[in-house]
């Protein structure tokens, strides 16, 4: 891929139930929860639009009508909806269902509630520059575990000097956490199950093939998983722009 060429499409995962965000998500889908007066989904769509990606697929399940109505108000992007009202397909299954709408290699996948502030060079631009189809099937955006806002887990991956990843050891602590933003290739979905499955299955396949790589984000990332984390994210953003 040319260093200046962005992927042709992005998929935003917006079909989750948002259980940890209750009671806010009892009547509002998590992607429409607002941080600093703007829906989480719009923050993600803004990053995609700023990267020059116009074709976007958004999957829906929980309170789907609200998300469909919301994305219809965006006239700066060509947004298609992948409908999962019939069954929740998890991350991997949801992407697999939407592949005919995506039609790009590679393509961006981001959690609709992924919230980040770009560093000197926008994250999606840096990922496009880093992508190497000869070596990679997946490229994950990573953040330093200790510096992530709203995150109190043990991290997900270690990374060597080339960017190649390995999973955190059981019971251990890893220096990097997955931000929910990635570049990946459609061929990864060959021979995957019909129905629901996790994107984690494709992490494992790429790891086994030594084709899973990471890129450390040089800006802020906020894990907005609970009502309390909304306030924490708003404070972090305010501090970053003051």
Image (cartoon, rainbow, N blue to C red):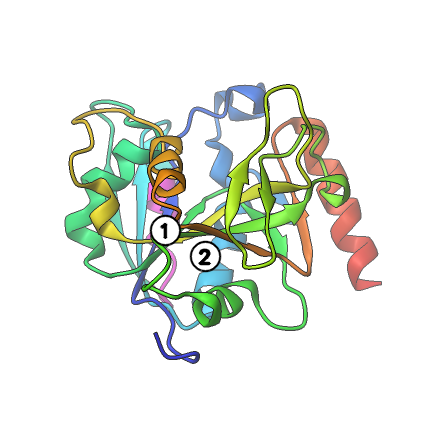
Element at badge 2?
helix
Boundaries of the magenta span: 67-77
The residue positioned 59% from the left and 21% from the top of the image is 170
Relative image position of residue 50 (x, y in whole percent): 49, 70
Relative image position of residue 160 (x, y in whole percent): 59, 51
The residue positioned 76% from the left and 38% from the top of the image is 232
Residue 106's disc is none
For label 2, the residue is 45
Mark 2 touches mark 1? (CB < 8 Å)? yes
Of badges 2 and 1, the one in the foreground is 2
User: Whole-Å distance between the Cαs marked 2 and 1?
Assistant: 9 Å
- Which is nearer the eye, 86 or 65? 86
Question: What is the crowding at mark 1: few (fewer than 14 residues within 10 Å), some, or many (at least 20)?
Answer: some
Is residue 4 placed above or below 173 in the rendered structure? Answer: below
Total count of labels: 2
- Which is nearer the eye, 63 or 97? 97
Relative image position of residue 147 (x, y in whole percent): 76, 45
For label 1, the residue is 71
Magenta stretch: residue 125 in it? no
Q: Is residue 62 left or right of residue 125?
A: left
Q: Is residue 55 left or right of residue 13?
A: left
């Amino acid at each position: 891929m040319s260093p200046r060429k962005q992927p042709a499409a992005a998929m935003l995962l917006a079909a989750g139930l948002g259980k940890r965000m209750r009671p806010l998500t009892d009547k509002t889908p998590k992607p429409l929860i607002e941080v600093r007066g703007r829906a989480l989904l719009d923050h993600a769509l803004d990053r995609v639009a700023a990267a020059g990606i116009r074709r976007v697929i958004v999957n829906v399940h929980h309170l789907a009508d609200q998300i469909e109505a919301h994305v219809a108000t965006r006239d700066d992007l060509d947004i298609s909806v992948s409908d999962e009202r019939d069954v929740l397909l998890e991350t991997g299954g949801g992407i697999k269902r939407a592949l005919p709408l995506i039609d790009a290699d590679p393509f961006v996948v981001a959690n609709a509630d992924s919230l980040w502030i770009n560093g000197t060079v926008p994250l999606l631009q840096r990922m496009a520059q880093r992508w190497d189809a000869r070596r990679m099937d997946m490229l994950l955006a990573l953040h330093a575990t200790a510096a992530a806002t709203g995150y109190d887990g043990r991290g997900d991956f270690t990374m060597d000097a080339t960017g190649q990843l390995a999973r955190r050891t059981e019971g251990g602590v890893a220096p990097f956490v997955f931000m929910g933003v990635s570049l990946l290739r459609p061929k990864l979905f060959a021979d995957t199950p019909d129905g629901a499955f996790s994107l984690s299955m494709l992490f494992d396949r790429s790891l086994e093939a030594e084709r899973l790589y990471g890129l450390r984000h040089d800006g802020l990332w906020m894990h907005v998983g609970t009502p309390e984390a909304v306030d924490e994210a708003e404070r972090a953003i305010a501090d970053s722009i003051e």
